[in-house]
Amino acid sequence: MKRESALRYGAYYFSRLLPHPLLRSGFIAAIRTCVTVMHGAAAAAEGGEAQSVLRTLRDAGVALITSPLNPEQVDDVLAYLKTAPVALGSHGQPVTVSSKGVSSAVYDAPTILACPHLLKAMNDPAILQIAAGFLGCNPTISGVGLRWSFADGGKADIEVQKFHRDTEDWKILRMFIYLTDVSDDSGPHQFVAESHKRMGRLRLKPYTDEQIDRQFGRERVKTIIGPKGTAFLGNMWGVHRGVPPSVRPRLLFNCTYTMTASPIYRYEPVTVADSHLYDAYTNRLLIR
């Protein structure tokens, strides 16, 4: 186990030294081949929507998808969270859309996995098929997140509210679902279209607005708004951010699909009901 962890850490830091997509692609192919040899080939993506989403991800880097949560299920999630304490923010107290004096609040993995419908959404067959097509191998769910972002003067005070790339793995697909209505004043997600095809930087400094305009062009910044339940997928090598809410808060759920476990996270799988309904390999890091 220590040797495997050392190899993963080495691969992680080595990936930081290869910011060019063409150089990264060779190592991604090698990792994909190893995963396929060890755990079997992924099923080919079928259906018109899956193929359309994969094309859009390849071309633009971000794609809207049919949400795995219907409006009633979103309401169930919100009802559950009314009494669920947060892990970070508001001193651990439950947080709702009307909470005051909070800039952000984050739920921990056990709370997310116990929340109704979210684990099932993460394992939606259509989403897993797209993730397998994107990664080229059977996907690993390597992270989940559930965060409130509240209006706090419109100032970006946390890293995810600044333009950046994610680097916790060589290739990352992330699903986002808005659990509140999101408009321009309530913290929409922004993605710089086609930036996933461009070279990154050795240092993980966020991009300023001026650098975005100069390097990519302001016209490539796509702002995603929509009612609660709106869902989309993003290639996280692309430059993106969550805009700080200026008026209304935003609740965002995300699930991360990668080729392997990320060495920078500590995984402690939790016991969940009906775990047998979900693929053991794909979910091995989070549930048992």
Image (cartoon, rainbow, N blue to C red):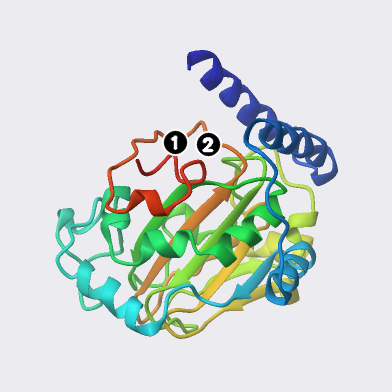
User: On the rendered image, what quadrant is the C terminus found in?
Assistant: top left
Determine the secondary structure under disc 2.
Answer: loop
Residue displayed at 33% across by 70% down: 150
Percent across and percent down for residue 202 are 69, 37
- Looking at the picture, which amino acid does disc 2 mark? Ser
Percent across and percent down for residue 6 are 55, 18
- Residue position for label 1: 265
Label 1 Cα neighbours within 10 Å, binned few <14 / some 14-19 / many ≥20: few
Using the image as rendered, state which of residue 93 and residue 122 is in the foreground: 122
Determine the secondary structure under disc 1.
Answer: loop
Residue displayed at 56% across by 40% down: 168
The answer to whether mark 2 and mark 1 are in CB contact below 8 A is yes
Using the image as rendered, state which of residue 223 and residue 73 is in the foreground: 73
Q: Mark number for residue 262? A: 2
- Looking at the picture, which amino acid does disc 1 mark? Tyr
Q: Is residue 285 visible?
A: yes
Q: 218 left or right of 71?
A: right
Q: Is residue 235 visible?
A: no
119 versus 227 height, above or below: above
**Distance between mark 2 and mark 1 Cα atoms:** 6 Å
Residue furthest to the top in view is 3
Residue 116: quarter of image = bottom left
Label 2 Cα neighbours within 10 Å, binned few <14 / some 14-19 / many ≥20: many
Percent across and percent down for residue 173 are 61, 55
